[in-house]
Image (spheres, rainbow, N blue to C red):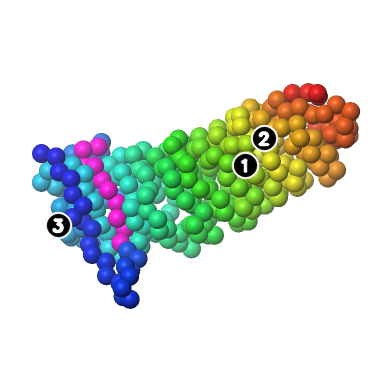
Amino acid sequence: MIGSSKIGLRPIRGGGGGAAPNPDFVSTWDTTKAGSASDTIVLPMTAGNTVHWGDGSSDTTNTHTYASSGTYTVTIEGTVNTFRFAAAGDRLKILDVSNWGGFDIWSDRVFQSCSNLDVTATDSPILTSSNLSARSTFQQCNLTNVDFSTWDFSVCTNFFKFLNNNTSFSGNVENIIHSGVTEARQAFLNAPLGSPDLSTWDVSGITSWQDSMRNCQLGALTDVSGWIPKGNMTGAFLINPDFEGLGLDTWTIGGITAAGNTFSSTNISTVNYDLLLVSWEAQAPPNAVAISFGSANYTIGSAADTARTSLITTYGWTITDGGGI
């Protein structure tokens, strides 16, 4: 027999006539998905919190067997600070987080490989001061319209594979990168980001960029103004055929150590490429940089043409682009 229940939700009472914020962690699970037995849920956490299992029963364990398999809403009271899948356990059974409440993303890989998981919650989780890593937090999940811009990531320094391979994503990642972030490799690989205002990011601390926004379907209006990129940028914007390079001319590039195919398979406009070449050459840039600007064209006989020649002859750059027009 297949069951379905939301009985796990407990009433929340607030003063002043309004509803108080829900302090509980609320999630939806399908017991029939792969993992433990088809009538069972095993929470990836230490027992001790009061858990309302969605079938009318409550206890302080982390494992529950239902009378019938199916979909259940599970409510966990209090601060939840040992919960971590790390690509194991009943990761395929969790379908949705509808309220974060006291949930603390206390470690890396908390929801890694929860391939059926979306987040519809409008509140934000706790990101504890003891956690310096957002590594693989939502790697290979099924997130759609999550607004990360409201989350406080100020304690996180490592975004390695943070949203990697969330191929249905259409949410908001503005404001999440701050000066304390040092690691962004594959952070948003294969996660469609649209046309965010990435001038809201402070990237000045990042030294590892490889494939960070590769194949993210960045739109023409994606703005990367004001960046101070450093370190290895190889593949950072690779395979974003609609990205036109808005704001690239405002970059301070002296800290870049490697670039390679950073802008291969992009669509940097001639206007933006011309501005980039003039601006970057004027900065007395690092020597011997090899970089691809995809099929970008510069204007023959212009200041950009002169700047491009100087980058090659004076600074030893190897430039791949679409040539002059």
Tell me: 113 left or right of 73: right
| Extent of the magenta region | 23-33
Residue hosting label 1: 222
Question: What x and y, as percent, mark residue 60?
Answer: 21, 60
Q: What residue type is labelled 3?
A: Ser
The answer to whether the residue labelled 2 contacts the one labelled 1, judged by CB atoms less than 8 Å apart, is yes
N-term-proximal mark, 2 vs 1: 1
How many residues crowd around disc 3 within 10 Å: few (fewer than 14), some, or many (20 or more)?
A: few
Does the stretch in magenta take in 30?
yes
At mark 3, the secondary structure is loop
Identify the residue at horizontal 61%, vertical 29% (top origin).
241
To which residue does mark 3 refer?
57
Which amino acid type is shown beneath numbered disc 2? Glu
Asked if residue 278 is among those painted magenta in the image, a careful observer would answer no
| Relative horizontal placement of residue 36, taking residue 20 as reference (left or right) | left
193 is higher (above) or lower (below) than 298 = below
**Would you say residue 238 is visible in this rendering?**
no
The number of discs equals 3
First-in-chain label (3 vs 1) = 3
x, y percent for residue 155? 53, 59
Residue 271 appears left or right of 137? right
> Measuring 45% from the left and 59% from the top, which residue is drawn there?
127
The quadrant of the image that shows the C terminus is top right
Residue at x 24% of width, y 48% of height? 42
Q: Residues under labels 3 and 2: Cα distance? A: 55 Å
Can you give x and y, in whole percent of width and height, for residue 208 in the image? 62, 43
